[in-house]
Image (cartoon, rainbow, N blue to C red):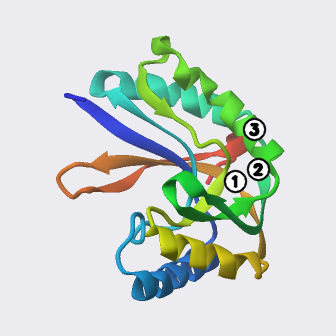
Amino acid sequence: MGNSQLFLNIISPPDDLKVLVSKTKRVLLNRYGAYKYFGSIAHITVNTFFARKEDEARIYDRIKSKVGKIEPMEVAIRGFGYFPNTRTVFMKVDNKQEFSVLTKELSFLKSRDSGARKFFSPCEPHLTLASRLKNDDFKQLKYELDAKSFEYNFEADSLTVLKYDYERSRYGLFEEIPFGNKVN
């Protein structure tokens, strides 16, 4: 995208859940070999988009204004879900209504007038464990996880904004924006 930067807006779970997800991904890596996203830190994607350098400040001032209106929210993770077309396994966010408030506030990014380009928001909030598994591995893991349960609750009190570093080929922290104008 030329002089554009890639941004990723996420809800970042507590450290203990990040550690659990990391250990789970290591087990899956040892069992199935490399797969897409095995090295990513646990997060729930809100949206991604590209922005030109000259539009960044304007876009993030507006994001801060919108996020400041949102109260901290309870995130309830319940069980596992699957996207068969991409052979993706994830932890399901059960209280989707809470997330719809956040995604609605940030929907202005879909507009060409916002300065954002190539906007993407997942069809449902989730925490990815593995993606692009081999077909047989996906079926086996789905079968195993269908027999398991998982529950975890936490309060999300901010939107974490990551910016892609093309030289290092990874995302880095751009800004942490508190919900409800809470001061960190």
Label 1 or label 2, whichever comes before in sequence order: 2
Q: Quadrant of the C terminus?
A: bottom right
Circles 1 and 2: CB atoms closer than 8 Å: yes
What residue did someone put label 2 on? Answer: 72
Type of the residue with mark 1: Asp
Task: Where is residue 53? Give x, y as percent.
Answer: 29, 28
| Residue at x 51%, y 27% (from the top left corner) | 61
Label 1 or label 3, whichever comes before in sequence order: 3
Q: Is residue 109 above or below residue 135?
A: above
Type of the residue with mark 2: Pro
The quarter of the displayed image where residue 126 is located = bottom right
Left or right: residue 23 compared with residue 83: left
Q: SS of the residue at dot 1?
A: loop
What residue did someone put label 3 on? Answer: 100
Categorize mark 2 by other alpha carbons within 10 Å: few (<14), some (14-19), many (20+).
some
What residue did someone put label 1 on? Answer: 157
| Residue at x 41%, y 88% (from the top left corner) | 30
Left or right: residue 101 compared with residue 3: right
Closest to the camera, between mark 2 and mark 3, is: 3
Nearest the viewer among 174 and 26 is 26
| Residue at x 45%, y 87% (from the top left corner) | 31
Task: Where is residue 51? Give x, y as percent.
Answer: 36, 28
Mark yes or no: residue 120 visible: yes
Query: What is the C-alpha distance between the residues marked 1 and 3?
Result: 15 Å
Nearest the viewer among 157 and 122 is 122
| Residue at x 39%, y 70% (from the top left corner) | 35
Type of the residue with mark 3: Ser
Categorize mark 1 by other alpha carbons within 10 Å: few (<14), some (14-19), many (20+).
many
